[in-house]
Amino acid sequence: MGSAGLVMIGAGFAGLWTAVRAKECNPNLDVLLLIGGVHRTSWQAAALLPA
């Protein structure tokens, strides 16, 4: 089982950009986004996160 420094549940756009900002501030931080349902824009936006 893994771990993450930041977990966003039901992230939506606010959570997505919080995660992006967290990665910008700390590139070594492991971020996990848990997005439920089928929200085309959320899935497309989540692809923008750096690996």
Image (cartoon, rainbow, N blue to C red):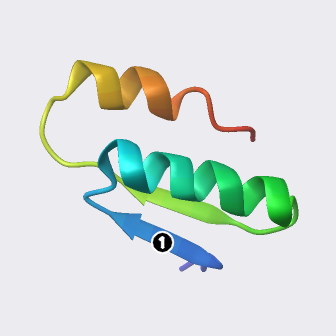
Quadrant for the C terminus, please: top right
Residue at which label 1 appears = 7
Q: Residue at x 48, y 71 (%)?
A: 7
Q: Residue at x 61, y 62 (%)?
A: 31
Dot 1: within a 10 Å radius of its alpha carbon, few (fewer than 14), some, or many (20 or more) residues?
some
Q: Looking at the image, how many numbered discs can be counted on the residues?
A: 1
Q: With 43 as the anchor, is 37 left or right in this view?
A: left
Q: Residue at x 25, y 58 (%)?
A: 10
Which residue type does callout 1 highlight?
Val
- The image position of residue 32, as x and y in percent, is 52, 61
Helix, strand, or loop for circle 1? strand
Q: With 1 as the anchor, is 30 left or right in this view?
A: right
Name the quadrant containing residue 4.
bottom right
- The image position of residue 3, as x and y in percent, is 60, 80
Name the quadrant containing residue 22.
bottom right
- The image position of residue 48, as x and y in percent, is 61, 27
Name the quadrant containing residue 43.
top left
Q: Is residue 20 above or below residue 43?
A: below
Q: With 26 as the anchor, is 15 left or right in this view?
A: left
